[in-house]
Amino acid sequence: MREVEVKVLHIDKIDIEKKLIKIGAKLVKKEKQINIRFDNANHDIKKNYGGYMRVRETEDLITGKIVNTMTLKKNISKDNVRINEEKEVIISDLEETIDIFEALGYKRKKPGKKNRTSYIFEDLLFEIDEWEKRIYPHPYMEIEGPSKERIFYAIELLEIDKNNVTSQSLDDLVKDL
């Protein structure tokens, strides 16, 4: 799967949710997530692949359902929008998957927890992320769509200050703190 996205920084969560509802966006998810990244001692996934590998436990706060996934994500471009190639599978046993990765020499990084609220409007996905403070202390919104043009349409529609729009990854944002 290819994802095209940007992050919108310096958001007021209540204000942005009001704007989303006003344009007709529909709430589709409220989640608690635990994200665990893996790499080996040489950081080969990051250096050689240009991405990362993670497992995620997602609890849907609307349905109560828990889903575990394994994802390999590779950054393709950061020019105005972030384009990633993403391979993801559902896993039945989170701890066994972690044990397999560790047996293969991958080290788990400290888990990161976040709350995610997701809205959909037409072919656009809006995800408001709130990480635990030690990971990233400010809420932000990701806008994901089929193209750069559609994402910039959403930015205009929501009257977002373009100075608050970035194609940076979370790792890049953390470095800038």
Image (cartoon, rainbow, N blue to C red):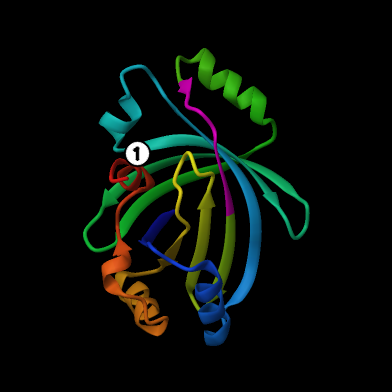
What's the residue at 26%, 30% (across, down)? 47
Magenta range = 107-115
Instruction: Name the spot of residue 147 as percent of width and height, x first.
Output: 34, 70
Instruction: Name the spot of residue 3 as percent of width and height, x first.
Output: 40, 58
Q: Amino acid at mark 1?
A: Gly
Instruction: Name the spot of residue 141 as percent of width and height, x first.
Output: 45, 63
What's the residue at 43%, 47% (across, down)? 86
Quadrant in the rendering for residue 95: top right
Judge whether residue 116 is colored magenta: no
The residue tagged with tag 1: helix, strand or loop? strand
Is 150 situated left or right of 57 in this image?
left
Looking at the image, residue 79 lies above or below residue 39: below
What's the residue at 65%, 60% (across, down)? 30
In the foreground, 147 or 142: 142
In the foreground, 135 or 1: 135
Pick the quarter of the image with the C terminus: top left
Label 1, on which residue? Answer: 51
Question: Main structural element of the magenta stretch: helix, strand or loop?
Answer: strand
Dot 1, crowdedness within 10 Å: few (<14), some or many (≥20)? some
Number of disc labels = 1
Quadrant in the rendering for residue 159: bottom left
Is 152 situated left or right of 33 in this image?
left
In the foreground, 30 or 99: 30
Looking at the image, residue 106 lies above or below residue 13: above
What's the residue at 75%, 60% (across, down)? 62
Judge whether residue 113 is colored magenta: yes
Instruction: Name the spot of residue 123 as percent of width and height, x first.
Output: 48, 75
Is 140 situated left or right of 91 in this image?
left
Residue that extends furthest to the right in the rendered view of this protein: 64
Residue that extends furthest to the left in the rendered view of this protein: 79
